[in-house]
Image (cartoon, helix red, strand yellow):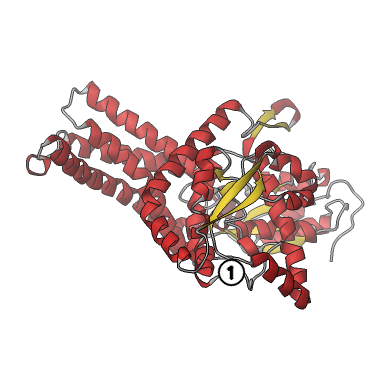
Amino acid sequence: MTTKAASAEPKIALDDVRLSWGQRAWANVRAAYRPQTRLSWLFVASDFLAIGLSLLASGFVVAIATYFFFDIYYLREGLPGGTSRLVYVTVIAVGIVSVLSLRGHYRCGVPLHRELQQVVTVIGFAMLLEGFLHYAQKDDFSRLWLVATWLFAIPLVLTGRALVKMIVTKHDEWKIPVIVVGSERAIESALTLFQAEYQMGYRTVSKLVTADNVPFGHDDFVRLRAAVKPWRGAHIIFAQPFPFDPSLRGVLRYLNTERIPYSLLAPLHEMSVLNMEVLPLYRNEMVLLSPREGASRVTAAIIKRITDLLIAGSTLILTLPLMAFIAAAVVGDRGTVFYGHERIGRHGKKFTCYKFRTMVPNADAILADYLRHNPEAAEEWARTQKLADDPRVTRIGRFLRRTSLDELPQLYNILKGEMSVVGPRPVTEAELLKYGETRDYYLKMRPGVTGLWQISGRSNTTYERRVYLDGWYARNWSFWHDIAIIMRTVPAVLSSRGAV
């Protein structure tokens, strides 16, 4: 039952919080304790193994490359600086693990985009540090081997962690036990968020439901204490509207003195949460939240465009044989190879979005006839602009759609500057009318081959959800978030989640 206390702050009796010496001793260490530390050694071992493999693999690649291009047979003579590199890399690897451990990488709670940023930053600094040590000692070493080692380390570290996460996320003991406090609607939103950000490892063990627009009362505080007691290392998350409920000050005082970890999950609609600058104002116990501009900044736009050209250009070269094979298969299914459809791009400019043809030639007539005789399909089309069982799609087209291979020709759109690797879904002029206020956000970005919609269930999501994701992406663009989306696109495509 939800308590409707009239007081602005719960009155906490001293008898209620008096603990034994043993309980207080445990309270001093419980904030630093996490049950998932039992499995953290797997992440540490994975990082050490990845760095060791990068040292060996890069050395082998450099030895082979120098033999073919420079006629130097390092495999027989040994790469220069091998002994000193082994010592330096071992010591630096310990430093890398120590720094990342302090950043919480071997526990839960680090989003993928932040993990990417910090791993790349730390490994980049490690490369500079090792180079400085070699120059300072005047060592004879292979510069190519040094650079290749740390470049190889980045994907190997991230791949190793992804494999470990696949293992440990199956064990609840690794996850942080979370107690969510808030209204029913706020709690449901929080649970949806935790499910989407599964790599953070939150495990909801208790829900403390409070009433909307009612101060947090003494009975609510008693229920919170009872919920915390059985769980060691439990993390309290207040799913609260913004600004923060002042009636929780007494509860926060209790959590602070008992060193129980807690967080505030506050919705900041229309604000750029990924590019948020937090400035503490110490004297007033307040924080100043300032969203920084994302892709609209000149430097950010240049970085995004250069990234698009590098990824699209290299992918196009690597996939040319595959695209030739697909083109031959599509031609054999009677019709043209490519299909172009008019879409709305950045600043409202129209462009032709290219795909491999996946439909029969008279697709429009077949669709109109099918919708006329199938009311349920007509309702589905009106709601999502897609059909789970589309009669227009050819046999080879179903395979191409399920694997997203039909979108490979959009690499040409990227090179032309009409699309981006990551961005909102390219929509038609008719669809853009349904975007409402989100239309302004959409028109500031180039549409993307992949995006939040691609990794969030694709056609399994509602149309309103897709529109929201497009707006969210435009508000919160960052380079590291783009890289995280690209990394998540691969498993999403391979699993064919929501593909039609």
Quarter of the image holding residue 459? Answer: bottom right
Q: Check disc 1 and give the amino acid type.
A: Val
Quarter of the image holding residue 20? Answer: bottom right
Q: Is residue 208 above or below residue 300?
A: below
Res 249 visible: no
Q: Is residue 460 above or below residue 58?
A: below
User: Residue 430, image x and y in percent?
Assistant: 76, 52
Res 184 visible: yes
Residue behind mark 1 = 393
Q: Nearer the viewer, residue 419 or 60?
A: 419
Q: Given the current orientation, which residue lies at the most extreme bottom position?
A: 373
Q: Given the current orientation, which residue lies at the most extreme left position?
A: 76
Q: Secondary structure at mark 1?
A: loop
Neighbours of disc 1 within 10 Å: few (<14), some (14-19), many (20+): some
Specify the quadrant that holds the C terminus. Answer: bottom right
Q: Nearer the viewer, residue 90 or 81?
A: 81
User: Residue 1, image x and y in percent?
Assistant: 84, 66
Q: Residue at x 22, y 44 (%)?
A: 61
